[in-house]
Structure formats: structure tokens, C-alpha cells
Amino acid sequence: MQIRRLGREGPEVSALGYGGMSFSDFYGPTDEAASHAILDAMIEAGVSHFDTSNVYGAGRSESWLGSYLKGQPQARDALVIATKAGISKTAEGARRFDNSAAHLEAELDRSLRRMGVDHVDLFYVHRREAERPIEEVTQALAALQAKGKTRAIGFSEIAPASLRRAAAVHHVDAVQSEYSLQTRSPEMGLVQTCAELGTALVAFSPVGRSLLSDRPLRPEGIGAVPFLKKNPRFLPGNHEANLAITDRFRALAAEMGEPAAALAIAWLLAQGAHVLPIPGTRSVAHLREAIRGTEIPLSAGDMARIEAVLPIGWAQGDRYDDVQWIGPERYC
């Protein structure tokens, strides 16, 4: 397994990580045993980077990691654990963002208890509270690092300009953003700014929510995933068009003798040593396909062939709808 670093000053991790949202029912039902099987397969393959959040399954993702570590305490040394906080709900159940120092520390403490650990290796602000200066939030994260509750700090879904403001206060180890052959917007400044500042770019949804795999979700399966029912790229018309376009990518992967998901991961890893994909899956077999992506050397010719079948801007539909866009920072 390739080894990379979570930013210039952060811990070393496997080049490929795992997105713990799949320990919730976000993309379909799963259970604790299946999630523990994923962790077994990760450790066996040397995948050390585990990314989760306090809101994934209302804490269930963290709890299931905690039950795994309780049964196998030696596994803690094999894992670099990242979690996030900053998304909360009002008394009426509406989604809101809270980046106050008190909220972040209280939520991190709850996360530590759920996972049964005394610190995490990386703690992110999950979504930025627009009204609160990012400099103040960075100071709150730095205080948690100074207390030993996290080894590294980061932000999810922020703009390059916000990263620069935060980095002027304290080094930011990682920024998490959607990035894949389907979503290329990070190339409009975030990839470059992260590289310049020594910040890791942790890429979630690296196989395009299945569209860059050999088993993409078909229209008849979208109804079971509430998030995708409203996502523009999976709406009727757009979804069928995107499937047809990505058929070319699947054909290319087959011609190269590789799983499509592996080729998508290999392409991302080739974008820079600071880029770290974190696919999520409920299937050990699918995880192994992603791991295969760390073993594929891509030549300049290979990269050109991939770009030819999936040129930048090919996807039909925005990556979020108006409601899903509340929180992430747009910058291009």
C-alpha cells in the first residue's frame, strides 16, 4: 500500500482511505457485522485512513468503529482516525451549523466516547458557519490540538480563499472536498492551494456515487437513496445521459483490464501526492476494487485516454441541488 501524509505536518496514512458514511444507511441498509468486515479487510490490506463524522448515522458510524476497537484494541495502532463536527439541528429539527469552540469540543468529546479512544488523528469542521470568522474557528481547532484531543486539524468543503485565511492563523493539515473524474471543480484553485500550503486534499465520492464504477446505480434503484432522488446528476434525463457517457469509461477500464472504480482511484492519485481518496462502500469486494487503484501506474498516454472519454465538464446536472448546496462554499 502506498503511504502518503495528511498534510505537511500530519500523520502518515495509506494513499487510499475509507469513508465511514457507508457505516450508516445513507446509501442503503447495512449492519454492524458488515461494517466490521470492512474494517477487517482494511487492516489486512494496509488501509489505515478511516474517515467518519458525528452525524453519520447519528453517531452510529463512530459507535461501530468503537465496538470494533473494543473487541480488537490492537487495531487502534493500525488506524488513523478522522472525524468531523459542526453540523447540528435546531429544536425544531432543522439543519444548522455551529462552529463555536464550545460546540466543537463537546461534540469531539462525545465522538471520543463513542469510539472508545482518547484522541483522534484528524478533526475537521464539517461545514463552515458562514457568520463566524474562520480565523476564530481555526483558533478553536488549534486549541483542541494543543489539548491532545486531535493530532491534526482540517475543514470540509471550504473555498481556497477560506483555506488561506485559516492557514494564516494555524497550519491546516487537511481539507476534504468532493473530487473525482465527475467533479473537477477542486482543480479551479483548491488542488493548487492545498499543494502550496502543505495541506492534504481528502477526496470524498471518488467514484462519483457509483457512476465511475462497473455497477452504477440504475434509475430503478435511485428511489431507495433519498439523497440521490433529489441530486441533479441522478434526476431523470440527467441520470440516463450520465450513464451513457460513463459507459465509455467502463469500456476503457475493461480494455485496460481493470475495474472502473480502480481506474478512477488511480486517476485521482495521479493528481498529486497530497490527494487522498476516501471511497465508501458496504461491500468488501468493492473495497478491494478501490484498493487495486493504488497499484495501477498510469502513463501520460493512459491519462490522455481517460481524459478523452471523460473530458472535464462532461457530467450533466450540478453536483448538489439548492438545499444540498447549503453549507459547502462555492468558489468557481
Image (cartoon, rainbow, N blue to C red):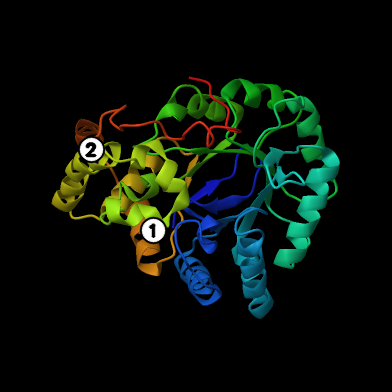
Secondary structure under tag 2 reads helix
Percent coordinates x, y for residue 129 in the rendering:
71, 32
Which one is in front, 85 or 142?
85
Q: Which residue is mark 2?
A: 241
Percent coordinates x, y for residue 205 in the rendering:
44, 46
Q: Residue furthest front?
A: 92
Work out whether residue 208 can be spotted.
yes
The residue lying at 50 percent from left, 25 percent from top is: 192
Image quadrant where residue 88 sits: top right
Percent coordinates x, y for residue 9 in the rendering:
66, 40
Side of 16 where 196 appears, left or right: right
The residue lying at 25 percent from left, 32 percent from top is: 307
Which one is in front, 163 or 314?
314
Q: Which residue is mark 1?
A: 291
The residue lying at 64 percent from left, 24 percent from top is: 162
Percent coordinates x, y for residue 322 in the rendering:
51, 31
Question: Mark 1 to mark 2: distance in Å?
Answer: 28 Å
The residue lying at 67 percent from left, 34 percent from top is: 172
